[in-house]
């Protein structure tokens, strides 16, 4: 598997996970906190992937 398709697959999975937790966080009060946490996590993970 090429690196490009590997990254694409990972991004798709991350977006799916983010969407799911976004939907779940709508039920909770601290939605924006969770979103900030998630985006930080995604950026950090992506940075580690690309190193």
Image: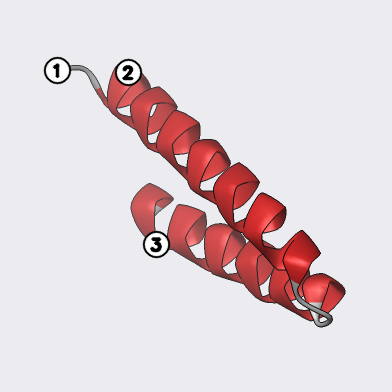
Q: Which residue is mark 2?
A: 5
At numbered mark 1, what does the secondary structure look like: helix, strand or loop? loop
Q: Is residue 6 left or right of residue 34?
A: left
Label 2 crowding class (10 Å Cα cut-off): few <14, some 14-19, many 20+? Answer: few
Quadrant location of the C terminus in the rendered image: bottom left
Q: CA gap, disc 1 to disc 2?
A: 7 Å
Could you tell me if the residues under marks 2 and 3 are in contact, i.e. CB atoms within 8 Å? no
At numbered mark 2, what does the secondary structure look like: helix, strand or loop? helix
Foreground: 25 or 3?
25
Q: Earlier in the sequence, mark 1 or mark 3?
A: 1
Q: Is residue 6 left or right of residue 17?
A: left
Up-down relation of residue 1 to residue 16 (above or below): above
Foreground: 17 or 24?
24
Residue at 68 percent of width and 62 percent of height: 39
Q: Nearer the viewer, mark 2 or mark 3?
A: 2
Residue at 56 percent of width and 39 percent of height: 15
Q: Which residue is mark 1?
A: 1
Q: Earlier in the sequence, mark 2 or mark 3?
A: 2
Foreground: 16 or 26?
26
């Amino acid at each position: 598997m090429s690196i490009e398709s590997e990254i694409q697959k990972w991004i798709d999975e991350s977006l799916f996970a983010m969407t799911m937790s976004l939907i779940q966080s709508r039920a909770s009060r601290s939605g924006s906190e969770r979103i900030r946490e998630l985006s930080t996590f995604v950026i950090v993970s992506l940075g580690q992937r690309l190193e």
